[in-house]
Image (cartoon, rainbow, N blue to C red):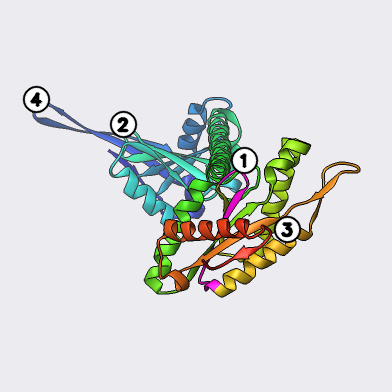
Amino acid sequence: MWQTFPDDESQREMQVVTASIPLDFQRYWLGVLAMDFSVQEMKTFLVNAIKTGEEGEYQLYDNRLNLIASSAPGNVLTLLSPREQEMLSRASSHENQGGIRLVTRYISWENLRNFDGVLIRIHTIQEGVRGDFGSITIALMLMWLMFTLMLLISWLVIRRMVRNMSVLQTSLEWQAWHDALTRLLNRGALFERAIAETRLSERLKRPVAVIQLDLDYFKSVNDRFGHHAGDRVLSLVASTIASHIRQGDLAGRVGGEEFCIVLPNTPLKEAQVIAERIRIRINSREILLGNSISLRITASLGVSGSDDTGEYNFENLQSVADHRLYLAKQNGRDRVCAEG
């Protein structure tokens, strides 16, 4: 049994720790063997037991957490706060050893054999970066930083890959839906969107119009000036169409030199006006093919509308507009036909 007598803090050096053990032989009580150790002697034992070069302050407490001895000089003694003592008491009552991490200190503790008390070791932040304990701490911090850096780099790489995939997907989708030369919708995309638009117009009971446009004598342009000139003509006509339609309207290339325009929420008369504007602009535009070569081209247009035919089926509306385009060709070309 160990007994401490911490009566007066000012008389600590005079206090003693008594170690005693009962003596008996064959159930006969012989007495008690006791030995007194002064606090100064306990401190000397504690300091001598510490390995050279070890960091931190060692403290020895009894079972009531009264300080018996410390390895620190008397004027720099580190005392535990009541809260820290409560944490240590609770921890040491369940385990034989462990550690408590505080804001600026780390306390490691261990219950001693044959002694009803606890030995603790206190590390400060400055001591933590030195010695074996500091080396382990620094190594763990470096590993944590490397792991965090790897996570950040992985996140950036994945983010960039996702962004590139999104851009690629958008590009592929655009290529699948558009004509590369004119940058208007291709035939398949136009028909798919036009069918959806005419069905919506029918449900909402609003008019929808279709314009079929064909360039006059376009074959002669290819024959006289080559396909490069023909491609330039198609590109300029497409840009003219795109600049004369509204947001929400659909325009696409449906044949070699043939275009189709779908105008939602547009009656036949208004669609006829839009078609006439496009025709005039195409006719008045001089197309430069070289240093001294230019040409003008005309277009014939056929217009149909649901308010005129009572028809909302896109293919039927396009068929009517195509028939009226044929009539415009028959009547001299370079004109708009909205009846017949």
Which element is circle 2 on? loop
Which element is circle 4 on? loop
Mark 4 surroundings within 10 Å by alpha-carbon count, few (fewer than 14), some (14 through 19), many (20 or more): few
| Residue, disc 2 | 113
* Left or right relative to 223: residue 8: left
Q: What's the distance in space between the residues labelled 2 and 3, CA to CA?
A: 103 Å
Upstream in sequence: badge 2 or badge 3: 2
Upstream in sequence: badge 4 or badge 3: 4
| Residue, disc 3 | 282
Q: Quadrant of residue 143?
A: top right
Most foreground residue, 93 or 156: 156
Q: What's the distance in space between the residues labelled 4 and 3, CA to CA?
A: 127 Å
| Residue, disc 1 | 126
Relative to 126, is 241 above or below?
A: below
Amino acid under disc 2:
Arg
| Range of residues picked out in magenta | 255-268
Relative to 213, is 42 above or below?
A: above
Upstream in sequence: badge 1 or badge 3: 1
Amino acid under disc 3:
Ile
| x then y, percent, for residue 11 | 49, 51
